[in-house]
Image (cartoon, grey):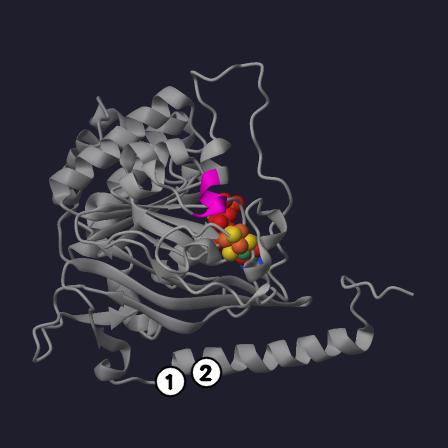
Amino acid sequence: MKKNDQYISIKESRRIIRENIRQMKYYEAQKRKPRELSEYTAPMRSNDNLIEIDNLKTCFFTDNGTVMSVNGVSFDVPKQKIVGVVGESGCGKSVTSLSIMQLVQAPQGQVVDGQIRFNSGELGQTEDGRDIAYDIARTPTSEMYRIRGKDITMIFQEPMTSLNPVFTIGYQLDEVSFLHTPGISKEDARATSIEMLRKVGISMPEHTYESYPHELSGGMRQRVMIAMALAGDPKLIIADEPTTALDVTIQAQILELLRDLQKKQGCSIMLITHDLGVIAEMADEVVVMYAGRVIEKGTAQDIFHHPLHPYTIGLQKSKPMINTDTNEPLYSIPGQVPSPINLPNTCYFRGRCDKCNKKCAGPYPAGVQVSDTHWVACYLYENGKEENQ
Ligand SMILES: Nc1ncnc2c1ncn2[C@@H]1O[C@H](COP(=O)(O)OP(=O)(O)OP(=O)(O)O)[C@@H](O)[C@H]1O
Ligand code: SF4
Ligand SMILES: [Mg+2]
């Protein structure tokens, strides 16, 4: 009889649970261990970067086995730039951003390897002039409280889940000021909150200040979330599908607002979306993820005008275009993403790729730098340019 890969015997299930408990205890104990500053700091590769993610691995210990949600991800977020992270559902975009915030659901979810260097600008430099950064993957929780919400903030897809329905907008905005500016008076906090609401384009900020979240429209709530995210003058804003819940006109307004504020405040944005149109409008640099890995990265120009990886090319083809023949069905990439448990040691896109050849049976392709800015992980570009197989 054919063995069913989905089936787990009781014995196997017990073994997985025992192993999970052991692993979770180990990683939780690591987090609680007192650490010297030198153990959770590291020099930046380039002082122009705000974030450098190197070989990040984040997994979830589930009863079915270990889910490798983020499996060796590396990319940079340069200072004052917008980096778009794109990929289909479940490819690890949110888990990557939650890892940066140290907000992965513990104890099941753990960062198990890699570095997330955050150039806060306050830790000095090495002898050879490189900025010293926090390695968020090892930074103690107590230290992270200072960074999170002030230096790095996050805007989520559905603001209603982040705003508390029982407090007014004003109360929740004032809280942010109390947190970031200890000792600030109630009147000053109110004035700051109203100013923040004005900054994000709310026309009657005094009125909105007194309102409860349910009294506002979706677009207004997302503006309030942006106001909150900007309050501490952050260096990085992570926007995870910030406009997916909004209609197209409001989406355009919110994106424009984000871009304007980013320019004015001089911060960086990591913009996560599955919408290539949004990325094309906004991003300076683009990271394409597939099944927990980065498969291509480059400038927006590289990715939109010279996409290399067959998955990126497929993504572009599946984007609805106004000027194409409306009778033609929208292209969709055939097949499915492999299960994140027991991923094969071959290219993960192999089962869906129309350019697959005999080389692709080899181990997972190493990345290739095809130009100063453009990187791809695919056997077709092993020698830095596309090979005719
Ligand atoms: N709490 C969790 N427990 C177990 N697995 C999880 C958990 N959170 C995420 N995962 C898994 O991690 C993988 C990556 O999830 P993630 O949420 O990062 O995807 P995503 O790229 O943000 O997708 P989407 O576009 O749908 O938001 C998925 O396979 C998901 O099932
Ligand atoms: S390595 Fe091979 S299978 Fe994978 S994307 Fe490239 S051509 Fe396709
Ligand atoms: Mg997500």
Q: Which residues are magenta?
A: 309-313
Q: Which residue is mark 2?
A: 29
Residue situated in front as seen by the camera: 15 or 160:
15
| Residue that label 1 marks | 33
The residue that appears at 48% across and 54% down in the rendered structure is 92
The one nearer the camera, 253 or 173, is 253
Mark 1, other Cα within 10 Å: few <14 / some 14–19 / many ≥20: few
Determine whether, in the image, residue 146 is placed left or right of residue 215.
Answer: left
Image vertical order of residue 327 relative to residue 315, above or below = above
State the image quarter where residue 122 is shown.
bottom left
Q: Position of residue 133 (x, y in %)?
A: 20, 70
Q: Position of residue 110 (x, y in %)?
A: 48, 69
Q: Residue at x 57, y 67 (%)?
A: 345
Give me the residue at 59% from left, 54% from top. 350
Asked whether residue 158 is in view, the answer is: yes
Whether pointer 1 and pointer 2 mark residues with C-beta atoms closer than 8 Å, the reply is yes
**In the displayed structure image, the side of residue 49 where residue 111 appears, left or right:** right
Q: Is mark 2 within 8 Å of ligand 1?
A: no
Type of secondary structure dominating the magenta stretch: helix
Which amino acid type is shown beneath numbered disc 1?
Answer: Lys
Q: SS of the residue at dot 2?
A: helix
In terms of secondary structure, where does tag 1 sit? loop
